[in-house]
């Protein structure tokens, strides 16, 4: 039985997916991109892109290079410094969905990945945007 890492085509495809994801974020979700380290051109920095690619590789069953370089992902802890609102979660998912489609992820894997990404994105949500908006008025 193959794992998602093998099904998607390995590390090269996941590096392309991460790059496409951030390219879409830079172009279409500037508020989301601004939560990341940016390079001199105002785009999400290459370090973030590389870390995300390594995370995806390990998360989907490939080599655990992310863990070797950065330790356990501890996603909630690493994202606690930024407000992950409903809007930010949805923006992240829009970027990922476009990247999955643009990278021609196999149909049999697409539904699985969409579900898993949605679960993780919702798990990382740390504030309720509707409540935050009401508190500001």
Image: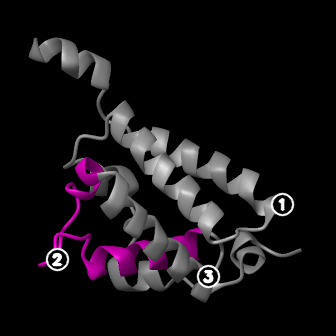
Q: Is residue 99 above or below residue 19?
A: above
Residue 59 point in image, percent of width and height? 57, 68
Residue drawn 66% across the image and 84% down it: 10
Along the polypeptide, which appears first: circle 3 or circle 2? 3
Q: Is residue 40 within the magenta segment? A: yes
Q: Nearer the viewer, residue 11 or 31?
A: 31
Q: Is residue 119 above or below residue 45?
A: above
Q: Nearer the viewer, residue 84 or 94?
A: 94
Residue drawn 20% across the image and 12% down it: 134
The reply to whether discs 3 and 1 touch (Cβ–Cβ < 8 Å) is no
In the orientation shown, which residue stands out farthest toward the front?
A: 27
Residue 5 point in image, percent of width and height? 69, 76
Asked which secondary structure carries label 1, the reply is helix
User: Where is mark 3, residue-wise?
Assistant: 13
Q: CA distance from mark 3 to mark 2?
A: 23 Å
Q: CA distance from mark 2 to mark 1?
A: 36 Å
Along the polypeptide, which appears first: circle 2 or circle 1? 2
Asked which secondary structure carries label 2, the reply is loop
121 sits left or right of 119 in the view: left
Q: Is residue 100 within the magenta segment? A: no
Q: Examine the image and state in which quarter residue 133 appears.
A: top left
User: Where is mark 2, residue-wise?
Assistant: 39
User: Where is mark 1, residue-wise?
Assistant: 108
The reply to whether discs 2 and 1 touch (Cβ–Cβ < 8 Å) is no
Residue drawn 42% across the image and 50% down it: 92
Q: CA distance from mark 3 to mark 1?
A: 16 Å
Q: Which residues are magenta?
A: 30-59
Residue 75 point in image, percent of width and height? 39, 56
For the N terminus, the quadrant is: bottom right
In the orientation shown, which residue stands out farthest toward the right?
A: 1
């Amino acid at each position: 039985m193959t794992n998602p890492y093998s099904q998607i085509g390995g590390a090269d495809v996941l590096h392309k997916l991460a790059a496409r994801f951030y390219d879409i974020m830079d172009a279409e979700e500037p508020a989301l991109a601004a939560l990341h380290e940016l390079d001199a051109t105002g785009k999400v920095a290459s370090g973030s892109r590389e870390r995300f690619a390594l995370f995806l590789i390990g998360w989907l069953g490939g080599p655990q290079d992310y863990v070797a370089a950065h330790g356990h992902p501890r996603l909630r802890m690493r994202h606690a410094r930024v407000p992950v609102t409903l809007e930010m979660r949805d923006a992240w998912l829009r970027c990922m969905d476009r990247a999955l489609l643009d990278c021609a992820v196999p149909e049999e894997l697409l539904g699985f990945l969409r579900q898993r990404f949605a679960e993780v994105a919702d798990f990382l949500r740390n504030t309720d945007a509707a409540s935050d908006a009401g508190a500001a008025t």
